[in-house]
């Protein structure tokens, strides 16, 4: 395995196990079997390392989510496709998924928050776009597209976290029926 990849893998494990702030560059380097100067050569800083981790982990998911959010008049179907994209992302990379959303709960002025923020906001914007596109069909939105987008993201994330709590982190299996039920529950709030 290439040294760059070893550094990334080991950093992900350490950040997931103990948090970004609790892990030092020296520890990452030692665990990856490289020197600190080698780590700095590849990533310039611990923050640069985190940026690379997030970019690599989020890019494929955001691409998939963007495809899933293409609204063509079927709100329920579009939301189900988006929920499936989130579930598949969490299943494929459960540790990375946990890391990304834990970073978003750091203090707003911290490096980890600033690094994760664009990726989480992009997800939220993609979901909000669905409600923007559906607003003409759903007259009761009355400017609540952002609220609906945030609510849907929150519901899906909480659902995934509950699955992790049930001990299914390594095998997050969510059926189409569960996704349909989750979306159906959410849509009751839209139409009320």
Image (cartoon, rainbow, N blue to C red):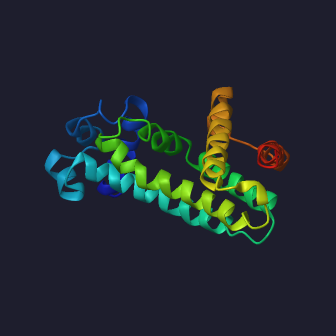
Looking at the image, residue 29 lies above or below residue 139: above
Spot the residue most to the bottom.
72
Q: Quadrant of the N terminus?
A: bottom left
User: Residue 99: percent from the left, percent from the top?
Assistant: 46, 40
Up the image or down, 165 lies above or below 57; here it is above
User: Which residue is at a point 20% across and 37% down the rendered structure image?
Assistant: 26
Horizontally, residue 14 falls left or right of residue 184, namely left
Q: In the picture, residue 168 is in which quadrant?
A: top right
Judge from the rendering whether residue 99 lies leftward or rightward of residue 125; answer left or right: left
| Residue that extends furthest to the front in the rendered view of this protein | 142
Residue at point 72%, 55% (across, down) = 141
- As rendered, which of 141 and 8 lies closer to the eye? 141
Q: Is residue 170 above or below residue 166?
A: below
How far across and down, in percent of the image, does residue 127 sit?
62, 57
Q: Quadrant of residue 160?
A: top right
Quadrant of the snapshot with the C terminus: top right
Nearer the observer, 191 or 4: 191
Would you say 39 lies left or right of 62 here?
left
**Total tally of numbered discs in the picture:** 0
Residue 38 location in percent, x, y? 18, 52
> Is 77 or 144 nearer to us in this picture?
144
Residue at 64% in and 27% down: 165
Picture coordinates of residue 110, whole percent (x, y): 30, 40
Q: Residue furthest left?
A: 37
């Amino acid at each position: 395995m290439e040294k760059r990849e070893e550094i990334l893998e080991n950093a992900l494990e350490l950040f997931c196990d103990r948090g970004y702030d609790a892990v030092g560059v020296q520890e990452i380097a030692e665990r990856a079997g490289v020197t600190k100067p080698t780590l700095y050569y590849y990533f310039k800083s611990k923050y640069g390392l985190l940026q690379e981790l997030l970019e690599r982990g989020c890019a494929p998911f955001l691409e998939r989510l963007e495809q899933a959010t293409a609204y063509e008049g079927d709100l329920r179907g579009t939301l189900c496709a988006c929920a499936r994209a989130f579930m598949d992302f969490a299943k494929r990379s459960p540790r990375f998924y946990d890391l990304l959303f834990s970073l978003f709960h750091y203090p707003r002025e911290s490096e980890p928050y600033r690094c994760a923020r664009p990726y989480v906001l992009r997800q939220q914007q993609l979901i909000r776009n669905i409600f923007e596109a559906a607003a003409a069909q759903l007259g009761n939105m009355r400017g609540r597209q952002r609220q609906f987008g945030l609510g849907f993201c929150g519901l899906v994330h909480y659902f995934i976290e509950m699955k992790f709590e049930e001990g299914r982190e390594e095998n997050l299996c969510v059926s189409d029926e569960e996704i349909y039920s989750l979306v159906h529950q959410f849509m009751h709030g839209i139409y009320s």
